[in-house]
């Protein structure tokens, strides 16, 4: 983990006092985590400390610090003139950095302990200037021509040695050369008019008339109101508030200096650093409070007493001891739990513990399950619960003697004593009505209204079902799946099918009473696929023909879910509904919807209603579904507004998935849809689940986000939960936490397997506690934080005006950082932006979240799309939310066709693209292959098998399978990216300077948004300003 | 004229009419004093092998309020080509087709032997007969199997062009679509939800969607037959399909837990059947045939809940008004029956179960629509199988013995008015000059609708003499009545049968003997029984019994010969001799060496006395020397077979012996002349004592005589 300080101070700034504070922190944390740090990592730090890193940098995995310097260097390379005037400030900064070297070192020695910080030296005024500068000197031009090539080749090397130290620390060197073309000493108020090349034109539309107070806020035009006052404040403070800065930066010319994007923390850098230090290694979960590798880092996780981070990730691995402290830092204490996460084949699957009729051993008081946190005493006759401290008798069947260190002799034989995650076979007490559950059922419900017949969708689904049903999930030891299947088609009435194996032909039963829908048959509706295969195939062949002449275009929706749920209820089994639906359900029935998509509501207090269901029918339906273990997965094929907010509610609350294919076209979209369908059917999934989070005393779970339903404050009910669904849990103090006992979390999920077995899945995690804020900041996990922020913000969307939500997010970001600045960082000029190492990329990620269409009140964005994305994010795990908010952008033209690893990603900004380049962008939902106008013809030939750029047909959604290495490697890359993702990404081919490029640009999240949302640089300035204000 | 007995029989055979009085008292007061009202039993479609229908339309009286049909009683002026209506005396011109008419060239309707004549109407579209099977699937496996076989068999008996439909029910109700290939399709309804006809038609997709296109092009063929054909298809087209469908019919799949009755949605199933036909084929001959194996247990029309621990309502529950669902259920079925009648369709109920099936609540369905109601123990009995088969029996012309959508109109000469009718009919509420204000049975109208009828369907029609005592009908005159029955023949032809009868008027003071001699005691008993039953529908049982007793006593007082206060002197003439007594078989007949055959219409019981039974057990009948005994045993069997051949519905056939459990059927019917109360009979060869508190005929007659002669009465 990177704990390396990232320091960029103005020449005059002094960070020594901060250093003075740091050592105690190290002392405090140094020991426990020492062992975990890779020894090799120490070496680069040494040279760094010795201030001779230049030679080291180009080689292999570098510690974060140097690489960041390198990146700065890249920028600097474009502006050599700037650097050279810099030396004086450099000198002053150099000492400030030097003292950090030891801290850097110790951070490598003890990853969990360092208090090293990233100081983004940026005098407030300088930031202003820079932001103006960037406005006028677009990134594409800023480093004109030459820099772009080295940029894509990786980190620029040659100039580094010379400029590295000075350049990295001193952010605003005298920018004479740069300022020349880009900026005149304009008054701040007008700078935005020039805009960035890409988004600028749009910018003009919604940019309010520039007023003096807005300068920084311009990047946040929609958020104007929320930030306005604060920014105005900042603006005012600028001349006098930070006297040191401007004064030392020597006046107006420097104000125009552009803030170099390369000088601000790079997500790619952070990701790459973590990969470099921790990738490919074994991560053992043996100690409390250790911060796991980033979600983007591949490593082998070994369960040694704490749940794998694949199952649980926390926003921080060190909880503050008191609630006051927690309030002070405002860092959310949360865990993102993905109880059914897929485990790679090289990691051990969960052990299954079977205590027979005795059932799991549980604490008498708090009912926590036996786990490594239970302390055996009195020779093994009793044990003390780690959660509630209750002393329990060990049940006779479970007795075992203790060894000399007080550990049970069978410690390593029992998963529940030595592992963080394991499963119990549940006894009948854990089953509904004390009866063993029936195996679950899948019901396929196909909208056979006119449009779906006409565009061939019904035929496609029916054809696909014939093969995909062969792959129903099954228990490993079983030969066939225990899951039964059923079929319903519908338009404004419902058709149930009897596909009992002994029938010569299927029987159709029409239920027209959609007002009070019911299940017309019991026997023969849910069948074993293998037994009824011929009848089912017969049916699937007939369905498209049966409705071929139908011109019914009205549909119902709520009755469809109701029918499926009633069917499961009648069969007394849990299950999942696969609904294939395409239109607004306007037929007369419960849950009937009208088109209420009103763009006029945007930016009003009523905007939230667009995210709320239109009727409460769906709410109560969802409740019933959950009560009967009925999970609803919805495949939507809308060609216009279908009210996703209403239709998606039941899938959301029942742990189902919502898939949406806008304007579905057979030749373009069927592949994506079919992949989604296959994956969804084959997915690992648990049914009829109840999750309970138990914590040690002093704190408790207070809020839950995800595809869940809660009837009370503790039981998280899920009709089903699959391997891609995560529940984010927020914790709050209700008492003090003790540093020595730490904070323990036990997540127990009671569920029914696909084979119909009732089980308990237990995940245990121990966290540290500290009364030092620095410890807290050190153990934070930005990806999890963003996951939490996204979910809490997206939940709030239903109740609060977006403006307020955005304001809260920015405020909290600033607050967290300001608190760090105030309490943990070395005292330095207030104008210095100092970011905790663990939150280095919080601003950029936060900005991405703020720019997400859900939070952007823009009429250009379809209401359904916003509701859809809102829903998706609510169930995302950390890895998915990370990719979703900060897409992966891979240079393809520099591909090493011999390598099997993915190329190093680049930052999501247009300035990183080049006309000669080809780039692949993926965010988990979409995938784009962007082709520069001057893309190398041999690559084009290799990938598309056409002679030139002009010949490329952008209508394709899969790449042609061509035998050459380019094609093979690219397709391999695409499949690797796709592999781990829950949604199939539709590939769009985008040619530079063609219209569809606009869509692609929205994903260049560091730039100003197409529909608003500030650039990363602007946002950072804004946050900085906020922090400064808070500090003042 | 020979005897009245012959006269009555002759009239019945020719016209299907039997009057209680064949000579009519000439004033209202006298008629009232006759006690038994002036009434007749009319069998509108009495089989007349000797009566070929005429292929033209009847000639009507031109008076709009009369419209009586030309008949043999009319005065005809052959020269002027005029005829006088014998009901309203209107003089009418013969229609042009009758120009050739003369004394020697008379049309059939003027010949005396054609007092009953049938016309075939050629006008109007002929629509095929419709048979809609409504089948309960909550049956035992073998019961269902037997029913399925009967239904499959019936397909071969139906007219080939008849439309047939299938509704099955249990917990749900399924309306089967019969026209689909490759997949069998049905519309399913919840068995607990009452639906309006409109809803049913909407849900079945029978309502035509508003199609402005269609209106713009009126030349388009009418779509309705096409739509409805999904559920009702010509037998010849889908008999294979339907045979398979019936073959695959499964028992209701919903589990019935212990202690529960199966959920049977009879009420909704019938409602849907009625709604389906109502929407598609109103006023077309159609038969809804309900086959049920138990009481309705859910939804509208439920008779008992599904908890077995709560028994179905008993006679005592009904008496004490404790039958929870009865009123509601009855109301539901009455509503359905009335709708069905309005549509001109009829409902048959075939209820086969060992326990009650709720026929009490459902009876109006058959009663108001002219449907059959058949009750048996199981569908797997010859009682059901043969009865059902007999529904489709054909007459000598090869036509089905069933007719539909009939309207019966009664016209009377001025001295008479019609007071009402009792039978499988509903009022059409047609007021007119011949409608009496006093109602007997369904009154207040001169027309009734009979949705389903067969050659034995018989109505009781009650009349009132108009003339007051001070202005009696002049002597020597004749009163006339015309019965006009329009109906759809099973061949789908529309037909009109017209029966015109006349009887003499007599002064009851001077000619009481004439009137008395013309009394038809059999008809009178039936007519009085119908009145009693009709009254029992709305009145308390004891009140009705008291009323019947009083009527009988009054009749005896009027026509008996006796000395006052001397019961022993009481005598009744021959024409009244049978009227007071209900039974002929007496308990004293039950003797050890006798074989008895009892026919109670619904039951045929053969009973072997104790000794006979022992002989049979000993196998005497198989010994050549006792061939005589063999014949003795065989004789009642042959007689019973003869009865069984003709009777509809098929009676329960019981062959039992002394001490057999089924002997109860005999013992419950015989006249209890010996009971446990008159102990002197014990142990003697005087028959079998019956354990009952009911009075014997002797006791009854003694009381009757006593009361009849009493002046206090």
Image (tube, rainbow, N blue to C red):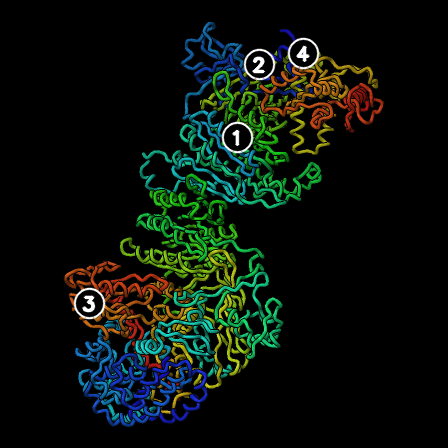
- Which of the pair B436/B18 is nearer the observer? B18
Secondary structure beneath disc 3?
A: loop
CA separation in Å, label 3 and label 1: 78 Å
Label 3 or label 1, whichever lies nearer to me, is 3
- CA gap between label 2 and label 1 equals 27 Å
Q: Position of residue A599 (x, y in %)?
A: 35, 64
Q: Which of marks 3 and 2 is in front?
A: 3
Which residue, given by chain and number where applicable, does mark 1 sit on? B346
Residue that mark 2 sits on: B13
Nearer to us: label 3 or label 4: 4
Q: How far separated are the C-alphas under marks 4 and 1?
A: 55 Å
Crowding at dot 2, Cα within 10 Å, few <14 / some 14-19 / many 20+, comes out as some
Find out whether the residues at labels 2 and 1 contact each other: C-beta distance under 8 Å: no
Q: Which label belongs to residue B494?
A: none
Which circle marks residue A993 in the picture?
Answer: 3
Q: Residue B624 carries which label?
A: 4
Who's the residue at 46% across and 29% down the image? B130
User: Where is residue B585 drawn, in percent x and y?
Assistant: 72, 19
Which is more toward the observer, A202 or A633? Answer: A633
Are the numbered discs 3 and 4 placed on the same chain, yes or no?
no
On screen, A148 above or below B494? below
Residue A807, visible in the rendered structure: no
Image quarter (top left, top right, bottom left or bottom right) of the N terminus of chain A: bottom left
Q: In which quarter of the image is the C terminus of chain A?
A: bottom left
Q: Are marks 4 and 2 in contact (CB under 8 Å)?
A: no
Please state the total of marks drawn on the protein image: 4
User: If you read the primary sequence from the N terminus, does the residue marked by circle 2 or circle 1 appear first?
Assistant: 2
Picture quadrant of residue A993: bottom left
Disc 4: host chain: B
Q: Mark 3 lies on which chain?
A: A
Label 4 vs 2, first from the N-terminus: 2
For the residues beneath circles 3 and 2, the answer to whether they share a chain is: no
């Amino acid at each position: 983990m990177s704990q390396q300080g990232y320091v960029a101070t103005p020449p005059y700034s002094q960070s020594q006092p901060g250093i003075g504070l740091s050592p105690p922190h190290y002392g405090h944390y140094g020991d426990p985590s020492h062992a975990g740090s890779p020894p090799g990592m120490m070496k680069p730090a040494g040279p760094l400390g010795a201030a001779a890193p230049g030679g080291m940098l180009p080689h292999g995995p570098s510690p974060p610090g140097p690489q960041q310097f390198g990146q700065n260097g890249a920028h600097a390379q474009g502006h050599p003139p700037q650097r050279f005037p810099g030396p004086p400030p450099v000198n002053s900064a150099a000492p400030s950095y030097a003292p950090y070297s030891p801290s850097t070192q110790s951070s490598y020695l003890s990853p969990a302990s360092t208090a090293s910080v990233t100081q983004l030296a940026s005098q407030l005024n300088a930031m202003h200037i820079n932001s103006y500068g960037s406005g006028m000197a677009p990134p594409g031009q800023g480093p004109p021509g030459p820099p772009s090539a080295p940029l894509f080749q990786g980190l620029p090397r040659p100039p580094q040695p010379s400029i590295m130290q000075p350049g990295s620390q001193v952010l605003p060197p005298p920018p004479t050369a740069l300022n020349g073309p880009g900026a005149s000493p304009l008054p701040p108020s007008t700078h935005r008019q020039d805009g960035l090349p890409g988004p600028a034109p749009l910018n003009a539309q919604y940019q309010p008339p520039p007023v003096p107070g807005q300068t920084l806020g311009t990047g946040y035009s929609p958020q104007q109101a929320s930030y306005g006052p604060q920014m105005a404040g900042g603006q005012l403070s600028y001349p006098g508030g930070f006297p040191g800065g401007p004064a030392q930066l020597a006046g107006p010319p420097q104000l125009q200096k552009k803030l170099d994007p390369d000088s601000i923390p790079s997500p790619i850098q952070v990701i790459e650093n973590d990969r470099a230090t921790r990738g490919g290694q074994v991560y053992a979960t043996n100690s409390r409070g250790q911060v796991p590798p980033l979600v983007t880092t591949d490593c082998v996780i070994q369960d040694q007493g704490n749940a794998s981070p694949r199952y649980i990730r926390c926003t921080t691995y060190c909880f503050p001891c008191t609630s006051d402290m927690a309030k002070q830092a405002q860092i959310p204490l949360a865990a993102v739990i993905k109880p059914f996460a897929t485990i790679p084949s090289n990691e051990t699957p969960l052990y299954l513990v079977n205590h027979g009729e005795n059932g799991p051993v549980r604490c008498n008081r708090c009912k926590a399950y036996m786990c490594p946190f239970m302390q055996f005493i009195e020779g093994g006759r009793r044990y003390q619960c780690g959660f509630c401290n209750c002393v329990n008798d060990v049940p006779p069947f479970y007795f075992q003697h203790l060894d000399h260190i007080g550990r049970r002799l069978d410690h390593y034989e029992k998963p529940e004593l030595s592992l963080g995650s394991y499963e119990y076979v549940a006894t009948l007490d854990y089953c509904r009505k004390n009866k063993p559950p029936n195996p679950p059922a899948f019901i396929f419900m196909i909208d056979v209204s006119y449009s779906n017949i006409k565009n061939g969708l019904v035929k496609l689904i029916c054809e696909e079902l014939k093969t995909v049903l062969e792959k129903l999930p099954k228990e490993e030891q079983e030969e066939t799946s225990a899951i039964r299947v059923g079929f319903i088609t519908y338009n404004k009435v419902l058709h149930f099918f009897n596909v009992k194996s002994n029938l010569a032909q299927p029987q159709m039963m029409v239920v027209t009473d959609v007002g009070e829908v019911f299940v017309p048959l019991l026997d023969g509706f849910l069948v074993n696929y293998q037994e009824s295969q011929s009848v089912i195939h017969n049916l699937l062949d007939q369905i498209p023909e049966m409705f071929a002449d139908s011109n019914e275009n009205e549909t119902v929706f709520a009755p469809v879910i109701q029918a499926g749920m009633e069917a499961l209820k009648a069969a007394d089994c849990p299950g999942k509904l696969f609904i294939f639906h395409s239109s607004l359900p306007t037929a007369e029935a419960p849950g009937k919807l009208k088109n209420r998509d009103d763009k006029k509501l945007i930016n009003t207090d009523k905007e939230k209603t667009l995210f709320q269901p239109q009727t409460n029918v769906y709410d109560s339906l969802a409740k019933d579904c959950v009560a009967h273990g009925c999970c609803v997965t919805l495949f939507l094929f809308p060609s216009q507004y279908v009210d996703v907010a209403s239709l998606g509610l039941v899938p959301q609350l029942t742990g189902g998935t919502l898939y949406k294919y806008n304007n579905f076209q057979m030749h373009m979209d069927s592949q994506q849809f079919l992949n989604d369908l296959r994956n969804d059917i084959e997915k690992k999934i648990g049914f009829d689940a109840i999750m309970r989070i138990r914590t040690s005393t002093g704190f408790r779970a207070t809020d839950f986000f995800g595809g869940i339903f809660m009837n009370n404050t503790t039981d998280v009910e899920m009709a089903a939960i699959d391997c891609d669904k995560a529940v984010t849990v927020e914790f709050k103090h209700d008492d003090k936490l003790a540093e020595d006992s730490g904070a323990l979390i036990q997540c127990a999920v009671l569920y029914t397997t696909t084979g119909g077995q009732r089980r308990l899945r237990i995940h245990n995690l121990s966290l540290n506690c500290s009364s030092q804020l620095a410890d807290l900041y050190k153990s934070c996990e930005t990806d999890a934080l963003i996951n939490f922020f996204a979910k809490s913000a997206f939940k709030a969307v239903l109740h609060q005006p977006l403006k307020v939500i955005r304001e809260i997010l920015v405020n909290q970001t600033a607050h967290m950082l300001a608190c760090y600045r105030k309490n943990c960082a070395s005292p330095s000029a207030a104008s210095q932006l100092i970011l905790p190492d663990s939150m280095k990329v919080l601003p950029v990620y936060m900005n991405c979240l703020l720019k997400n269409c859900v939070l952007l009140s823009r009429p250009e964005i379809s209401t359904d799309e916003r509701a859809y994305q809102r829903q998706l994010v609510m169930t995302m795990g950390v890895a998915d939310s990370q990719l979703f908010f900060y897409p992966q952008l891979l240079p393809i033209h520099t591909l090493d066709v011999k390598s099997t690893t993915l190329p190093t990603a680049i930052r999501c900004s247009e300035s990183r693209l080049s006309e000669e380049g080809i780039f692949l962008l993926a965010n988990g939902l979409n995938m784009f292959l962007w082709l520069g106008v001057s893309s190398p013809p041999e690559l084009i030939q290799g990938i598309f098998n056409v002679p030139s750029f002009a010949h490329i047909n952008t209508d394709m959604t899969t790449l042609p399978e061509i035998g050459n290495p380019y094609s093979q490697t690219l397709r391999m890359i695409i499949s690797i990216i796709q592999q781990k993702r829950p949604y199939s990404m539709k590939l769009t081919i985008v040619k530079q300077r063609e219209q569809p490029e606009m869509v692609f640009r929205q994903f260049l999240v560091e730039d100003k948004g197409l529909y608003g949302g500030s650039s990363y640089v602007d946002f950072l300035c804004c946050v900085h300003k906020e922090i400064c204000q808070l500090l003042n | 004229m020979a005897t009245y007995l012959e006269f009555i029989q002759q009239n019945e055979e020719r016209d299907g009419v039997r009057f209680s009085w064949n000579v009519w008292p000439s004033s209202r007061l006298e008629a009232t004093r006759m006690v038994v009202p002036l009434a007749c039993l009319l069998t509108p479609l009495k089989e007349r092998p000797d009566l070929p229908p005429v292929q033209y339309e009847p000639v009507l009286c031109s008076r709009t309020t009369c419209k009586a049909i030309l008949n043999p009683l009319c005065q005809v002026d052959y020269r002027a080509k005029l005829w006088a209506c014998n009901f309203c005396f209107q003089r009418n011109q013969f229609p042009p087709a009758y120009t050739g008419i003369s004394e020697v060239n008379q049309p059939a309707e003027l010949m005396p032997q054609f007092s009953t004549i049938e016309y075939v109407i050629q006008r109007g579209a002929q629509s095929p007969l419709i048979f809609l099977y409504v089948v309960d699937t909550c049956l035992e496996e073998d019961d269902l199997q037997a029913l399925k076989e009967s239904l499959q068999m019936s397909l071969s008996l139906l007219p080939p062009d008849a439309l047939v439909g299938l509704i099955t029910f249990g917990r749900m109700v399924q309306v089967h679509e019969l026209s689909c290939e490759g997949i069998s399709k049905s519309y399913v309804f919840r068995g607990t939800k009452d639906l309006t006809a409109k809803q049913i038609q909407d849900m079945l997709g029978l309502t035509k969607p508003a199609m402005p296109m269609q209106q713009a092009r009126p030349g388009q063929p009418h779509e309705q037959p096409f739509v409805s054909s999904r559920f009702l298809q010509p037998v010849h087209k889908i008999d294979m399909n339907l045979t398979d469908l019936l073959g695959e019919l499964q028992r209701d799949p919903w589990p019935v837990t212990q202690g529960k009755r199966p959920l049977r949605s009879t009420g909704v199933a019938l409602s849907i059947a009625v709604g389906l036909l109502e929407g598609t084929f109103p006023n077309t001959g159609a038969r809804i045939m309900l086959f049920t194996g138990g009481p309705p247990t859910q939804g509208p029309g439920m008779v008992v809940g599904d908890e077995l621990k709560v028994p179905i309502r008993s006679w005592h529950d009904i008496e004490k008004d404790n039958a929870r669902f009865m009123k509601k259920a009855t109301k539901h079925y009455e509503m359905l029956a009335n709708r069905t009648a309005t549509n001109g369709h009829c409902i048959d109920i075939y209820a086969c179960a060992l326990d009650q099936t709720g026929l009490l609540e459902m009876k109006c369905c058959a009663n108001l629509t002219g449907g059959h109601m058949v009750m048996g123990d199981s569908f797997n009995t010859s009682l059901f199988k043969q009865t059902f088969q007999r529904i489709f029996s054909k007459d000598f012309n090869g036509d089905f013995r069933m007719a539909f959508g009939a309207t019966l109109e009664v016209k009377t000469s001025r001295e008479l008015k019609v007071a009402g009718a009792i039978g499988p009919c509903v009022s059409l509420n047609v007021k007119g000059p011949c409608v009496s204000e006093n109602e007997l049975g369904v009154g207040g109208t001169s027309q009734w609708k009979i949705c389903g009828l067969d050659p034995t369907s018989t109505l009781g029609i009650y009349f009132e003499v108009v003339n007051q005592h001070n202005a009696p009908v002049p002597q020597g005159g004749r009163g006339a009545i015309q019965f006009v029955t329009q109906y759809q023949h099973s061949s789908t032809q529309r037909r009109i049968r017209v029966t015109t009868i006349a009887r003499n008027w007599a002064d009851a003071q001077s000619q009481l003997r004439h009137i008395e001699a013309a009394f038809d005691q059999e008809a009178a008993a039936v007519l009085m029984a119908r009145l009693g039953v009709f009254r029992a529908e709305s009145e308390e049982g004891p009140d009705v019994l008291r009323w019947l007793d009083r009527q009988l006593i009054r009749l005896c007082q009027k026509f008996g010969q006796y000395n006052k206060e001397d019961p022993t002197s009481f005598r009744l003439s021959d024409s009244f001799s049978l009227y007071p007594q209900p039974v002929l078989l007496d308990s004293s007949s039950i003797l050890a060496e006798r074989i008895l055959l009892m026919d109670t219409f619904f039951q045929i019981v053969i009973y072997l006395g104790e000794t006979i039974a022992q002989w049979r057990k000993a196998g005497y009948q198989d010994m050549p020397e006792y061939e005589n005994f063999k014949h003795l045993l065989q004789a009642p069997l042959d007689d019973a077979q003869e009865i069984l051949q003709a009777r509809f519905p098929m009676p329960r056939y019981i062959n039992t012996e002394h001490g057999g459990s089924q002997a109860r059927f005999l013992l419950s019917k015989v006249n209890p002349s010996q009971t446990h109360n008159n102990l002197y009979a014990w142990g003697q060869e005087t028959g079998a004592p019956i354990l009952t508190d009911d009075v014997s005929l002797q006791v009854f007659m003694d009381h009757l005589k006593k009361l009849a002669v009493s002046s206090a009465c």
